């Protein structure tokens, strides 16, 4: 079976087919903490799994919401409490994030990859992603849209909707940790899709059932802990490089 090396994990990742199960034991993506379904990349020994979109997310992102600096994909938040507040949706996160450390900007992976234009079956016009929307009411959930966070909008119809209402079947609790979001990423051209992943997506996938127990090898666990420490050191080095590359005078009020 082909294997895939991801920067956030010590071991090579294999392609797995996650079966839905009636038990309460389920696998979560280590990149976005959403439930895993279908094909995922994973290290079964470490119980480390990634949606393909999280596994192939770019290491650096030039986002129109923050044109001054590139956003860097970090495997874990740099804050002492181990979590971050997403500048796009206002929900917290504790896994992968696109980050600009000097400007204190953090985005969930799926928020960072939201399409700038979105078509919904329920609306006849294309919606545009607004980074500083006016305060309004979401046309789907009827809750307030906070102007501090992103939303989709149709100026022709005065139609506004939360980003998570637009991209998920069920909106997550307001102000809480996102647990069960179904990732909705922009469509990718087939040529680009084929180029980003080294694994044959639909051949040789190993089936994993949540009811099967996963035995963690102590040696592999020790390796994983060492790799996590190395990743933290790498993050510190990346932070230092980012700070060194920023013109501090541009940050002055």
Image (tube, helix red, strand yellow):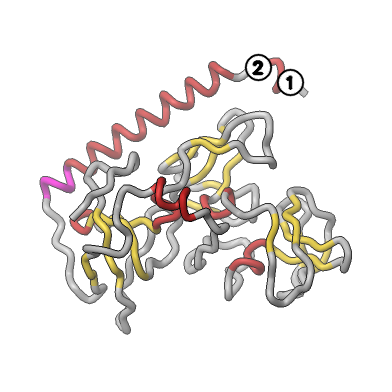
Asked if residue 146 is positioned above or below residue 226 in the image, the reply reads below
Q: Quadrant of residue 246?
A: top right
Image coordinates of residue 101 in percent, x first then y, are 56, 32
Image coordinates of residue 212 in percent, x first then y, are 18, 73
Inspect the magenta stretch and tell me whether residue 219 lies in it: yes
Inspect the magenta stretch and tell me whether residue 13 lies in it: no
Question: Residue at left 68%, top 33%?
Answer: 67
Q: Quadrant of residue 18?
A: bottom left
Image coordinates of residue 187 in percent, x first then y, are 55, 58
* Element type where label 1 sits in the image: loop
Q: Residues within 10 Å of mark 2 (few under 14, many from 20)?
A: few
Per the rendered image, the range of residues in magenta is: 218-222
Image coordinates of residue 11 in percent, x first then y, are 22, 45
Verify CB contact (< 8 Å) between mark 1 and mark 2.
yes
| Mark seen at residue 248 | 2
Asked if residue 69 is positioned above or below residue 201 in the image, the reply reads above
Q: Residues within 10 Å of mark 1 (few under 14, many from 20)?
A: few
């Amino acid at each position: 079976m082909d294997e895939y090396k991801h920067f956030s994990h010590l071991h090579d990742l294999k392609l797995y087919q996650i079966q839905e199960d009636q038990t309460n034991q389920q696998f979560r993506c280590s990149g976005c903490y959403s439930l895993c379904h279908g094909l995922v990349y994973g290290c079964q020994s470490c119980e480390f799994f990634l949606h393909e979109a999280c596994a192939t997310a770019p290491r650096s992102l030039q986002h129109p919401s923050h044109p001054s600096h590139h956003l860097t994909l970090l495997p874990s938040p740099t804050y002492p409490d181990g979590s971050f507040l997403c500048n796009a949706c206002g929900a917290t996160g504790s896994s992968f994030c696109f980050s600009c450390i000097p400007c204190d900007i953090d985005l969930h992976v799926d928020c960072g990859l939201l399409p700038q234009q979105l078509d919904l079956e329920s609306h006849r016009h294309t919606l545009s992603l607004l980074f500083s929307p006016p305060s309004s009411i979401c046309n789907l959930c009827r809750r307030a849209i906070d102007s501090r966070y992103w939303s989709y909008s149709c100026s022709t119809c005065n139609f506004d909707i939360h980003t998570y209402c637009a991209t998920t079947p069920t909106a997550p609790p307001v102000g809480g940790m996102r647990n069960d979001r179904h990732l909705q990423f922009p469509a990718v051209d087939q040529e680009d899709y084929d180029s980003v992943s080294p694994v044959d997506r639909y051949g040789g996938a190993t089936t994993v059932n949540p009811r099967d127990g996963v035995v963690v090898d102590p040696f592999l666990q020790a390796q994983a802990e060492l790799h996590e420490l190395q990743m933290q050191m790498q993050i510190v080095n990346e932070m230092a490089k980012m700070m060194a590359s920023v013109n501090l005078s541009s940050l002055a009020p």
